[in-house]
Amino acid sequence: MQLVKRSVWLGVVLMLAVACWGQGIIINEVAWSGTAASSADEWIELYNAGSSVVDLSGWRIEFAGTVIYLGSEEGSTRNVRCSVLEPGAFLLLERTDDRAVDDRIADLIYSGSLSNTGCLIRLLDATGEPADTANLAGGNWPAGTGADGAPAYGSMERVDPLMPDVPSNWCTALPEWSAGRDATGEPVCGTPGAENTATRRERQAPCVELLHCGLESEHEMAVHWTAIDPDGAAGALMIDVEGSIDQGETWIGFVGDLANSGAYVGPIPESLVNGSLSETQLLVRIVATDADGWTSSVVAAAAPAD
């Protein structure tokens, strides 16, 4: 009976997600933990994924008793600087003042705190109908990190702006691709007012598939893979083959800077043999790097020799 209840609830969640998604304006990024400068420096980003200009007058965002009006200074809204969103444009809402993201001009200033333990955020249009949500199922945030996260204070980014609010469509921002600086001038771990790292990665990062990974003997192995670059030539990819005998804690290179040949057949580094591989699991990782610096990897356990 409990399984049936959970299945019904999951179905309701997915139906609501589909119903809310597709209205053009979406909740694109949530910095629920603030920044390294201050945990109070939260921000929320909206994105116009549609093809029409949208006047957000009468629209509002609601979470945990906070109501932010997008076109008027009432409720939790302190200052409205922009309420019209062009196609492909972002609307940045900063909490308390314009210092949360210090080198970006906030489109709206609001009051109200997002709980680090998670909450549902709803975006309602001018008729009061749901336009989008973030963390529809409630509970813990599906992505993002706090002070003790890795990385720390990472924002929660939507992966695909054309897909609904489900946990798999959210990802933690990557610090190396961040945009914007906090109140102390340090880079934020997020992309306020810019395209999400997760979205760019989905569209631009290499795709790697491991076809075969097996030991030929105690000292040799064979690995075969395919790799493509969605926005470039597959032949320009550089491939690194790495191994680990401590469940991925440390990685040791077999060979690096391979052209995308799709195969490595050769010796295993002595540091990875470490006695008998028949008693130790060898993990193999293929890392593909494109000309833009985007990387993707795939990991598999090496099959024992016949």
Image (spheres, helix red, strand yellow):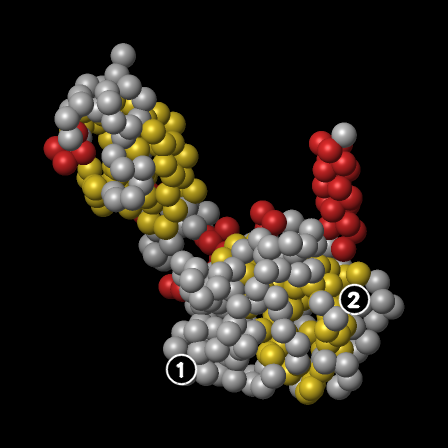
- The quadrant where residue 133 appears: bottom right
Q: Is residue 194 above or below residue 101?
A: above
Mark 2 secondary-structure assignment:
strand
Tag 1 residue: 185
Inter-mark Cα distance, 2 to 1: 34 Å
> Seen in the image, is 180 located left or right of residue 122?
left
Residue 217 location (% of width, % of height):
19, 19
Q: Residue at x 43, y 74 (%)?
A: 36
Q: Residue at x 61, y 49 (%)?
A: 167
Quadrant in which the C terminus is drawn = top left
What's under tag 2, amino acid-wise?
Leu
Q: Is residue 53 above or below residue 289?
A: below
Nearer the observer, 298 or 89? 298
Tag 2 residue: 124
Mark 1 is surrounded, within 10 Å at the Cα level, by few (under 14), some (14 to 19) or many (20 or more) other residues, namely few
> Across the whole image, how many numbered discs are drawn on residues?
2
Quadrant in which the N terminus is drawn = top right
Regarding residue 50, the answer to whether it shows in the image is: no
Residue 66 location (% of width, % of height):
72, 73
Mark 2 is surrounded, within 10 Å at the Cα level, by few (under 14), some (14 to 19) or many (20 or more) other residues, namely many
Regarding residue 303, the answer to whether it shows in the image is: yes
Q: Residue furthest right?
A: 127
Q: Residue furthest top?
A: 306
What's under tag 1, amino acid-wise?
Gly
Residue 295 location (% of width, % of height):
37, 50
- The quadrant where residue 68 appears: bottom right
Q: Which mark is residue 136?
A: none
Q: Residue at x 44, y 66 (%)?
A: 147
Mark 1 secondary-structure assignment:
loop
Residue 230 location (% of width, % of height):
46, 47
